[in-house]
Image (cartoon, rainbow, N blue to C red):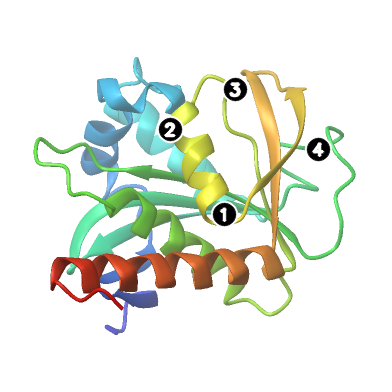
């Protein structure tokens, strides 16, 4: 783990994932390429120019209840993550927040050579990062109801849809994952990965 890295985990198949603090000025060009890509339509910044992206992440950087991070894969920028307090940001008044709740967003960098299982490894990394804080009891998300791909990923790491809500930007599925549900999901994912590895090696038991 480097001095600038805040969190690091090793995926048994895909290698090292880490998070570092986001620099709104230095990372603006990188972020602009990511958030305006056609595959980032649910990020809702497709029409933003680089200055607008820098301003948005400067606002997040300065906010007392919202943080943003650059995710690294094998020391290269590969995803964006945000962490927020839902009692103060995004979900204020939209659900009964509890002490120990934390909200999160993540976005994988666009690529022409997708790797099977990469996005699952990213969301697992972000979830482990959130739960690395012992005060966190639940992770709360509010994905667009149309974002079927992320609903499947959320379910894989333990999220349960609580209800459909309407935010100023979208119709969303309020979804919650407790620490216990995440631990159970992580155990299941590890067992599935082990079975896949054995099958690839021709081992049947």
Cα–Cα span, label 4 and label 2: 26 Å
- Please name which of the two marks, 3 or 1, marks the residue nearer to the observer: 3
Q: In the displayed orientation, state which residue is furthest to the top.
A: 47
Identity of the residue drawn at 9% across and 41% down: 113
Q: Which is nearer the N-term, disc 3 or disc 1?
A: 1
- Please name which of the two marks, 4 or 2, marks the residue nearer to the observer: 2
Report crowding for label 1: few under 14, some 14 to 19, many 20 or more residues within 10 A (C-alpha). many
The residue that label 1 is drawn on is: 83
Question: Disc number at residue 145?
Answer: 3
Cα–Cα span, label 3 and label 1: 20 Å
Decide if residue 93 is on the left or right side of residue 199: right
Cα–Cα span, label 4 and label 1: 15 Å
Element class at badge 4 = loop
Q: Give the percent coordinates (x, y) of residue 57.
A: 44, 42
Are the residues flagged by discs 2 and 3 in contact, CB closer than 8 Å? no
- Residue 105 makes an appearance in the image: no
Rendered position, 135 above or below 76: below
Identity of the residue drawn at 47% across and 37% down: 150
Cα–Cα span, label 3 and label 4: 19 Å
Tell me where residue 165 sits by quadrant. top right
Cα–Cα span, label 1 and label 2: 20 Å
């Amino acid at each position: 783990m480097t001095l600038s890295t805040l969190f690091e985990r090793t995926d048994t198949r895909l290698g090292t994932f880490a998070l570092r603090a986001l620099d709104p000025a230095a990372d603006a060009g990188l972020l602009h390429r990511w958030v305006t890509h056609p595959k980032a339509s649910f990020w809702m910044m497709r029409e933003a120019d680089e200055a607008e992206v820098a301003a948005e992440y400067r606002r997040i950087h300065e906010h007392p209840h919202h943080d943003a991070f650059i995710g690294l894969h094998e020391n290269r920028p590969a995803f964006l993550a945000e962490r927020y307090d839902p009692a103060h940001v995004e979900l204020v008044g939209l659900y009964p927040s509890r002490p120990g709740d934390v909200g999160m967003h993540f976005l994988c960098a666009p690529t022409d050579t997708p790797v099977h299982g990469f996005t699952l490894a990213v969301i697992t990394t972000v979830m482990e990062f959130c739960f690395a804080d012992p005060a966190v009891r639940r992770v709360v998300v509010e994905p667009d109801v149309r974002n079927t791909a992320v609903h499947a990923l959320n379910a894989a790491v333990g999220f349960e849809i609580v209800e459909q809500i309407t935010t100023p930007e979208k119709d969303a599925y309020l979804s919650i994952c407790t620490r216990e549900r995440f631990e159970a999901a992580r155990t299941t994912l590890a067992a599935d990965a082990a079975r896949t590895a054995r099958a690839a090696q021709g081992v049947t038991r």
